[in-house]
Amino acid sequence: MNWSKGGPSGKRGFGFGGFSLGGGGGGKKEEPRLPPKSHTSFGAGTAGGYGKNQQLPAFYKIGTKRANFDEENAYFEDDEEESNSNDLPYIPAENSPTRQQFQSGGGSDSEDDPLDAFMAQVEDQAAKDMKKLEEKEKKSYFRYMAENPTAGLTAEDEDENIDYDSDGNPIAPTTKKIIMPLAPMDHSEIDYPPFERNFYTEHEELHSLTGTEVLELRHKLNLRVSGAAPPKPSTSFAHFGFDEQLMHIIRKSEYTQPTPIQCQGVPIALSGRDMIGIAKTGSGKTAAFIWPMLVHIMDQKELEPGEGPIAVIVCPTRELCQQIHAECKRFGKAYSLRSVAVYGGGSMWEQAKALQEGAEIVVCTPGRLIDHVKKKATSLQRVTYLVFDEADRMFDMGFEYQVRSIASHVRPDRQTLLFSATFRKKIERLT
């Protein structure tokens, strides 16, 4: 069987080519050719397969040449080796001659890059500037603290306005209320009625004291007094000239002897003179202005409906306001005098109601009193006795403009008493 391409003398296709028989003449017998064995994954002995260790024919290797990735990866491996070799620069060991030469810049690798040198110079200059700035800030801070010793001190603002709901729970304010001062008042347009100021009569025992004895008595009581002809200090409650009603409550309150501030302050207040008393807390200064206040109030006519108080006591905190109010009620009940405490944190409605009902004495914090005056809950036209207690603390808490506003709304010929633990320049300017 053979294949014919076709042509002029024949047709294209398979044809019979005849038989070829071997003769017995000793010719070599030709074995029939077998088709090529297929390459499978079976092991040796499998029909049509090759063993594991048998070599494949050449034509099976066509197209199976493995790509040489080693040459391609060599490029990246070279870069890594070069980068790794430059990670750690050479640094000589400690205390070695090479290290000293390296630090002094004498080594072969000590040549500085111009950019590095410039950046180092910039960093040094920045560090110097920062140090100068810090020193300047420290000097400014210490100078400010020396000029303002109370700067940064926090004091609880007791004059804060807090409203309460129907259950008595406080309602947190969204923002802190800023209390503006009262509007200026022209006192020349108001016809104030006259009032008596002096209620003091010097006792016979004091009248007989000489000037030297008075100085010795003041030195014994540790008193320092300045002013034009101050009264002599008293040494007994009998020297004050109080009536029996007030003396009964004083004895009932277990007062045995007047304190130094009472010995000198009560005669001055009873004389109707303005006074500045410098005394610490617990020295008895509260009674020193309450007892003369009662005598002052009882000499004036009774309050009419709609009129404001006769005496106003201004203090910085709610606690102090409550304490003074309790003392005013204790001593004022001898004359059936009414006292109202007006301070931040209390009910505005209840305080306004008590003020409208009428009270001869009002003990208040400055901000809350200004609020009630603005809302027409009370008036300051009847006030003839004005007291500022712990004035230095009120100034420290920022109430100076409120204190000045209240003082400017009271008649100019009032009697004013100011008590403080210290005598600072602000208090001196206020007086």
Image: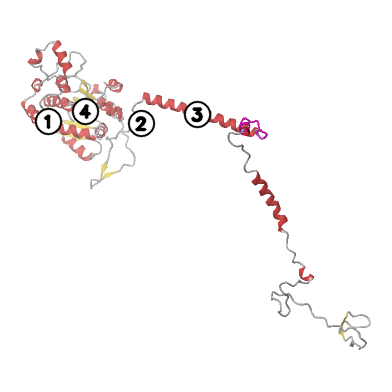
Q: Residues within 10 Å of mark 2 (few under 14, many from 20)?
A: few
Towards the viewer: 58 or 5: 58
The residue to which callout 3 is attached is: 131
Q: Distance from label 4 to label 2 (Cα)?
A: 24 Å
The residue to which callout 4 is attached is: 281
Q: Earlier in the sequence, mark 1 or mark 2?
A: 2
Q: Secondary structure at mark 2?
A: loop
On screen, 202 above or below 62?
Answer: above
Instruction: Indicate the quadrant where residue 145 lies.
Output: top left
Marks 4,3: beta carbons within 8 A: no
Q: Position of residue 120 (x, y in %)?
A: 59, 32
Q: Position of residue 194 (x, y in %)?
A: 16, 21
Q: What residue range appears in magenta? A: 99-110
Q: Is residue 163 covered in magenta?
A: no
Q: Amino acid at mark 4?
A: Thr
Marks 1,3: beta carbons within 8 A: no
Q: Amino acid at mark 1?
A: Phe
Residue 331: numbered disc? 1
